[in-house]
Image: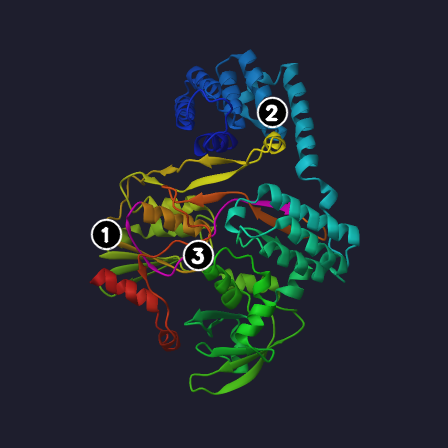
Amino acid sequence: MSFRRTLLAVALGVALFHGPAHASDADIRLLAKQATEAYAAKDYVASADGFAAAIAAGGDEPALFYNAACAYALAGRREAAFDFLRQATVAGYTNFTAIRADTDLASLRADARFDQLLAEAERLQQRRTRMWNSTAFVTPYQPVLDEDQRIAGLSRLWSEAKFNFANFDLVPDLDWDALYASTLPKVRAATDTTAYYQALRAFVAQLHDGHSSIILPAAVADQLDAQPGIRTALVEDRVFVRELLDPALAATGIAPGMEIVAIEGQPVKAWAQAHVAPYQPASTPQDLAARTYERALFTGPLDRPVRVGVRDKGGRTRDVALPRMPSKAFDAAFWGGPTFEMQMLPGNVAYVRILHFGDRSAVDAFEARFDDIAKAKGLIIDVRENGGGDSGEGYRLLSLLTDQPFRTSRWRTRQYLPANRAWSRPEGVHAGEAGEAMPDGKRHYAGPVLVLTSARTYSAAEDFVVAFDAMQRGRIVGEATGGSTGQPLLFDLPGGGKARICTKRDSYPDGREFVGVGVQPQVAVHPRVADLQAGRDTVLHAALGLVNR
């Protein structure tokens, strides 16, 4: 049953594709919603007829056919159940394992047609797998890949982006085919797998999209992305040590508040622009700056310490050699920590820091502390370090801040029809309407709310900020967000790596763009060097003043 609920959510949560329309997308969703409600009430005849009506109105989402089959089976209408189940597999639902296990279809299992249909579903699934996820590209890591493998990987990356990337309009001067042609010699010349993957990273970085990137094999990551346990900050166009993630580095004399002035004998910005920025998949200038100077500045081989020039608060400079951590260990330290932190600030203001929406832990913790939060004069929610996760978790948090339904992002994706290209017609766009989320209904914090953002606010965290902004629940304080969200398509590359290509473009409910731009704060506040070196949080201090004003 849990599987069926997932399908029901799919049917209700997207704008459905359809052919010659008999009804609007909203009408189809309404029919599906009514059918779902009838299913929940165990009125299976009404549910089945409702899903059938949604299909007749133009909906062809596989979930509609599958749900109709399940409801008809429960209603005892076997012929109709088989008919819609067959249509579900043709429409694209071929998870034969789930079909076999679904208790809603128990009444069909004794019929010989059930096993025949499962066999056909398995054949269709295998055919689709060969078409879109062939194992031909799945090869294990080797220190050196042969030339055919290297070219095949680049070609797959080029083709997946050419037909699936959602944001080519944001890079209007990019000639993707010409870039592919100019990258071929670099891929052929790559002397080992590390050099090959570095070439792929430079290639995909030209899409200028944070949700389109290369995922390195572990052995390559330790050659390219190992770095010392330091968190840096770009403040007033200068780079500073913000935190030591590895306490052992204190023995080198490096400390928070010191300025990074050089790397390997080169001025820090010259080093960063030559060795770091060209490989960063970033959606906006602020995103690129954050990735270059705050996330990947010291990347390099694990077995080679990095020589860093630092300047202390007194103006004295010296070089320190910093050992690098394995890439996986660095990521754990960089992204680790409690997902939820809360403290009461002066003036009875609740401060909540949400590190990510990757699981339910942060919002569960918010709910557990809701009685304390409800007593606060104001609430500050800090998502400056929130790299994303599940947008639904962000909406779950927002549901506690309102007593009214609220709208979430709109979205769109490319709709490529081969015949239109042959007829010299332009490519189409499929647009999904803004979603609607409901209030919690039991708990409602009604006090003033401020949300703190930065360029490191990303993905699902931006979806959260967009919905917060659109519902006009409070003010955004800080800096523009990273400007990148969407639905990546994940696929394999030779040598054990993977790639992601963004397939979906989100916007505000009213259509305003934030991908490639960033969500803009109503109150712009930028960190200051003096505050960083004194251990003060410029943005939080400003937000606290706004609440207590």
Mark earlier in primary sequence (3, 1):
3
Position of 112 relative to 135 (above/below): above
CA–CA distance between discs 3 and 1? 23 Å
**CB contact under 8 Å: marks 1 and 2:** no
Q: Per the image, is 482 magenta?
A: yes
Q: Secondary structure at mark 3?
A: loop
CA–CA distance between discs 2 and 3? 39 Å
Is 246 on the left or on the right of 182, as rendered? left
- Identify residue type, mark 3: Asn
Could one spot residue 345 in this view of the protein? no
Mark earlier in primary sequence (2, 3):
2
Is 60 on the left or on the right of 192, as rendered? left
Q: Tell me what residue is drawn at x 36 percent, y 46 percent.
A: 467
User: Start and end of the magenta stretch?
Assistant: 471-491
Q: Secondary structure at mark 2?
A: helix
Position of 518 relative to 294 (above/below): above
Q: Quadrant of residue 526?
A: bottom left
Label disc, if present, on residue 447 of the rendered structure:
1
Q: Tell me what residue is drawn at x 58 percent, y 20 percent.
A: 87
Tag 3 residue: 386
- Using a 10 Å C-alpha cutoff, classify the residue at mark 2 as few (fewer than 14 neighbours), some (14 to 19) or many (20 or more): many
- Identify residue type, mark 2: Thr
Label disc, if present, on residue 259 of the rendered structure:
none
Q: What is the number of callouts on the image? A: 3
Q: Tell me what residue is drawn at x 23 percent, y 52 percent.
A: 447
Nearest the viewer among 468 and 178 is 178
Residue 204: x and y in percent read 61, 54
- Identify residue type, mark 1: Gly
Tag 2 residue: 89
